[in-house]
């Protein structure tokens, strides 16, 4: 098993941080929570998308061009990732 260094990103508000990937829907701040589905357990490969993206992925059956366009993947820093997770995660007690 090879260990690779995490990809870094220079985030304006947070400086140089480890990068993560989220769907375009998770970048929206002025909407109600849209769910937060994490797609990797690797702390150096953080990936997440919303419930709508999960539905589209299930419908497409894989990462098709239509899915990628709908998802609009964006690279963010881990702090932005955590903020998005806090904003969009839907509690199971709701």
Image (spheres, helix red, strand yellow):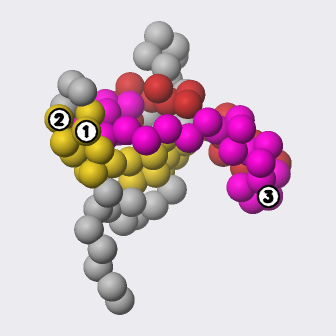
3D distance between C-alphas at marks 2 and 3 = 37 Å
Residue most extreme to the top: 30
Q: Residue 13 placed where, x, y %?
A: 21, 25
Quarter residue 23 falls in:
top right
> Callout 2: helix, strand or loop?
strand
Label 2, on which residue? 15
Q: Is 82 left or right of 32, judged from the image as shown?
A: left
Q: Tell which circle, 3 or 1, labels the residue nearer the N-terminal end.
A: 1
For mark 1, does the 10 Å Cα neighbourhood hold few (<14), some (14 to 19), or many (20 or more) residues? Answer: few
Quadrant of image for the N terminus = bottom left
Find residue 61 and name its label: 3
- Residues in magenta, as a range: 60-84
Query: In the picture shown, does residue 54 fall above or below 32?
Result: below
Secondary structure, magenta segment, majority class: helix
Name the residue at 39% across, 60% down.
45
3D distance between C-alphas at marks 2 and 1 = 5 Å
Label 1, on which residue? 10
Question: Which of the two discs, 3 and 1, sits closer to the camera?
Answer: 1
Name the residue at 82% across, 48% down.
59
Nearer to the camera, 89 or 48 = 48
The answer to whether residue 93 is seen in the rendering is no
3D distance between C-alphas at marks 3 and 1 = 34 Å
> Callout 3: helix, strand or loop?
loop
> Callout 1: helix, strand or loop?
strand
Q: Is residue 68 magenta?
A: yes
Q: Are marks 2 and 1 in contact (CB under 8 Å)?
A: yes
């Amino acid at each position: 098993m090879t260990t690779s260094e995490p990809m870094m990103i220079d985030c304006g508000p947070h400086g140089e941080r480890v990068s993560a990937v989220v769907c375009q829907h998770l970048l929206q701040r002025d909407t109600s929570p849209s769910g937060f589905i994490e797609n990797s357990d690797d702390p150096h490969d953080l990936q997440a998308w919303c419930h709508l993206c999960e539905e589209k992925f299930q419908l497409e059956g894989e990462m098709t061009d239509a899915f990628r366009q709908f998802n609009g993947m964006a690279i963010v820093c881990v702090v932005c990732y955590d903020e998005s997770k806090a904003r969009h995660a839907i509690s199971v007690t709701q």
